[in-house]
Image (cartoon, coloured by chain):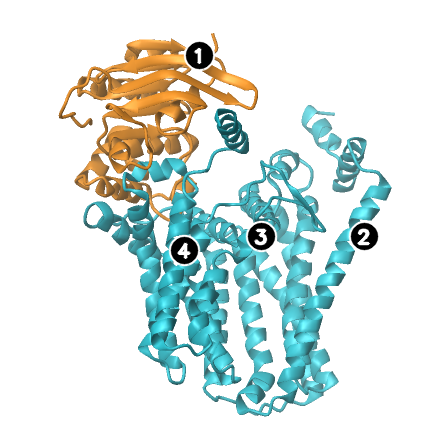
Chain colours: A cyan, B orange
């Protein structure tokens, strides 16, 4: 027997390799079976609690919608499932193309995928996980939206079966495209297009578009059956292609998932956005550099504006927020529409202060600018303020009875919110932790989630409550000044906990 | 490039009786020294001896006790004049994921009131002009280090504070760095640098401070 054949014969099967890996891991396990069972119980209990809370909220909304007699409510009730289905498929395609869909952790990539063990077998589990998640999402959202309608049980079954097929199809498509950057981008763009379509449709419905679509239940079921069969065939065909995925195809997605999971555990939504942005531009690789303009403060403002223009996809978020406000107005929110607009505007524009967040959390970068803190903060936040102002003008034109006061108050409230959330200090995991039902958490972690939305609400509260023009503007200005002051004071203390503790001790000793 | 001081103080940086401790562990104490314009002080010492901590104190971090002054004024990082005069590469530099290499330097050059062409010159000098249109996430670790150095060199300064600048640089890069720092000294800039590279220390250093000895 030649050496090559002997080496090939020594390669273990995927099953044997996994068994070996499991044995090794068990040997180093630091938890007993009882502890594992306890952890599983806590996880299941948390999921069940969340399910009950979310389910109750959805049931409440459905109850309200069913009892609401306005034309807006009727439109939301009947046409919403189509919008949700379209949006869900778009979001799933976008997410699959952004993440992988087949991913592996960096350790698995470096140690396991580098072995001659059959790669297809090793990647089958992550592929199955991607299929499972995509199917679950495709079923859950349209299913929930459909539950609020008066559709027949046969139609509901047909939609759910079709959703399973769609989940399988989308994942198979994204997996086939994964090793080809061009195709992968095309899948992402298709997702974006579907999301845009959903937005346009939602806006049209809010303006009174409705349709009468009557399809025989048996036809719906037949179509759903075809979709499921196509999905299954595509999923099986794509399984054959996963062995061709390279480590470079699967590792970055794994790192992204790990980062996103960490950010989600830390309730850090900005970090989620930052990770996605970093990933997008790493995939993009390079782009022709564009020269800035001006000097000093002005140069920072101009560059920040140019940076924002580099992400036109974000306009989708602005449009989505506008549609949310529009739908809210359509179902009769009344004066609460201003509050909803402030929150929606905050959510849609918070990405505009990503640079401020990066600079405020990086002492080296802040030093590199040479501007004083206030000037730097304002320079980095001006373009975000302009976006907030433009969005506010647009939304005020859409709302019935919108005025200049609304534009001013909304702009200030949204700008205060995005500045506060970008400049607030991150929760410190290196200091003392506080016990909570969710385990040990750093102080301020939960509060950090509401830093931003809180001032957006406060800034628009006076107008929402029907205060006079003077009071409404005065409150918004005061809140903006507070947000700016807090942001400036948040600067500086980026040192490790041990250092801050030492300084406090020394201070105590001196006094 | 360095900015000439209007007055020429004997010492640009003065450190007096400096002490820094983490909890009960004293990293360094009774530390006093001066750095004059056009001179380079090299910090040496084993890992954990306090080189980086000392550099941070020089650029504004509060020590446990003692004083650090720059150009006769107590070091205050919130003072824009101080920031305009002091350039640092301390390993705590992040980059904007969506700005290209050239755009980073263009932005910093303009923020410091420099001609934008400065960015191109520094790109050439640092040896990363071939990746000028790339985003930072795609750079190798050596290229990231060159970009970090470039962010300091693209602007004027009177004091340059560097923490192991030779890290991740190839042989050519290290030689270029030594030449560049020597030129900065000739132009009147003061340099304080922590390094483990004896060649770089010998080529640029005028004085050596051993920490943890």
Marks 2 and 3: same chain?
yes
Along the line of sight, the residue nearer the viewer: B117 or A131: B117
Q: Nearer the viewer, mark 3 or mark 4?
A: 4
Q: Residue furthest front?
A: A511
State the image quarter where residue B36 is shown. Answer: top left
Measure the C-alpha gap from mark 2 to mark 3.
22 Å
Measure the C-alpha gap from mark 2 to mark 4.
42 Å
For residue B211, the mark is 1
For residue A71, the mark is none
- Residue A358 at least partly seen: yes
Marks 2 and 1: same chain?
no
For residue A267, the mark is 3
Q: Are marks 2 and 4 in contact (CB under 8 Å)?
A: no
The location of residue A505, given as percent across then percent down, is 53, 28
Q: Which residue in the structure is indicated by mark 2? A: A41
Q: Which residue in the structure is indicated by mark 4? A: A483
């Amino acid at each position: 027997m030649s050496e090559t054949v002997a080496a090939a014969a020594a390669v273990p099967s995927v099953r044997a390799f996994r068994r070996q890996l499991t044995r090794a891991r068990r040997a180093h396990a630091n938890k007993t079976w009882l502890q594992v069972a306890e952890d599983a119980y806590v996880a299941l209990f948390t999921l069940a609690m969340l399910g009950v809370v979310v389910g109750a909220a959805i049931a409440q909304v459905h109850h309200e919608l069913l009892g609401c007699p306005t034309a807006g409510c009727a439109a939301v009730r009947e046409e919403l499932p189509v919008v949700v289905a379209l949006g869900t498929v778009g979001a799933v395609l976008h997410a699959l193309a952004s993440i992988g869909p087949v991913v592996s952790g960096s350790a698995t990539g470096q140690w396991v995928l580098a072995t001659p063990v059959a790669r297809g077998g090793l990647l089958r589990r992550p592929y199955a996980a991607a299929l499972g998640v995509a199917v679950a999402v495709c079923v859950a959202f349209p299913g929930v939206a459909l539950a609020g309608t008066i559709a027949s049980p046969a139609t509901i079954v047909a939609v759910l079966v079709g959703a399973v097929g769609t989940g399988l199809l989308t994942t198979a498509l994204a997996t086939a495209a994964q090793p080809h950057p061009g195709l992968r981008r095309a899948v992402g763009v298709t997702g974006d297009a579907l999301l845009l379509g959903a937005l346009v449709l939602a806006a049209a419905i809010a303006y009174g578009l409705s349709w009468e679509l009557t399809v025989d239940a048996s036809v719906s079921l037949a179509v759903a059956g075809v979709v499921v069969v196509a999905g299954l065939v595509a999923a099986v065909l794509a399984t054959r292609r996963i062995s061709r995925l390279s480590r470079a195809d699967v590792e970055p997605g794994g790192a992204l998932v790990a980062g996103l999971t960490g950010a989600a555990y830390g309730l850090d939504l900005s970090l989620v956005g930052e990770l996605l942005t970093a990933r997008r531009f790493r995939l993009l690789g390079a782009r022709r550099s564009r020269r800035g303009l001006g000097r000093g403060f002005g140069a920072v403002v101009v560059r920040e504006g140019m940076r924002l223009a580099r992400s036109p996809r974000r306009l989708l978020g602005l449009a989505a927020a506008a549609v949310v406000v529009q739908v809210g107005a359509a179902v009769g929110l009344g004066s609460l529409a201003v509050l909803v607009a402030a929150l929606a505007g905050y959510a849609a524009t918070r990405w505009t202060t990503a640079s401020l967040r990066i600079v405020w959390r990086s002492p080296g970068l802040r030093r590199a600018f040479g501007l004083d803190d206030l000037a730097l903060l304002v320079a980095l936040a001006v373009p975000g303020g302009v976006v907030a102002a433009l969005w506010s003008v647009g939304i005020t034109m859409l709302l019935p009875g919108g005025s200049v006061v609304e534009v001013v108050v909304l702009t200030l409230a949204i700008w205060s919110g995005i500045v506060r959330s970008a400049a607030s200090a991150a929760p410190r995991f290196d200091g003392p932790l506080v016990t909570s039902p969710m385990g040990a958490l750093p102080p301020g972690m939960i509060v950090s989630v509401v830093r931003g939305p809180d001032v957006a609400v406060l800034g628009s509260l006076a107008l929402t409550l029907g205060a006079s023009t003077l009071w409404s503007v005065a409150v918004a200005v005061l809140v903006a000044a507070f947000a700016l002051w807090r942001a400036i004071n948040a600067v500086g203390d980026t040192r490790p906990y041990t250092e801050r503790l030492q300084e406090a001790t020394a201070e105590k000793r001196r006094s | 490039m360095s900015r000439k001081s209007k007055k020429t103080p004997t010492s640009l940086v003065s450190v007096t009786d400096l002490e820094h401790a983490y909890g009960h562990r004293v990293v360094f104490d009774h530390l006093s020294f001066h750095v004059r314009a056009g001179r380079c002080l090299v910090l040496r010492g084993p890992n954990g001896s306090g080189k980086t901590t000392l550099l941070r104190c020089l650029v504004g971090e509060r020590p446990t006790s003692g004083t650090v002054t720059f150009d006769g004024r107590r070091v205050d990082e919130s003072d824009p004049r101080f920031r305009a005069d002091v350039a640092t590469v301390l390993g705590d530099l992040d980059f904007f994921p969506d700005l290209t290499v050239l755009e980073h330097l263009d932005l910093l050059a303009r923020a410091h009131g420099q001609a934008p062409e400065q960015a191109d010159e520094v790109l050439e000098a640092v040896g990363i002009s071939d990746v000028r249109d790339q985003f930072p996430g795609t750079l190798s670790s050596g290229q990231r280090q060159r970009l970090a150095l470039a962010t300091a060199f693209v602007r004027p300064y009177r004091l340059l504070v560097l923490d192991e600048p030779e890290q991740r640089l190839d042989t050519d890069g290290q030689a270029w760095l030594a030449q560049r720092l020597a030129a900065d000294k000739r132009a009147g800039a003061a340099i304080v640098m922590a390094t483990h590279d004896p060649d770089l220390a010998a080529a640029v250093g005028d004085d050596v401070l051993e920490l943890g000895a």
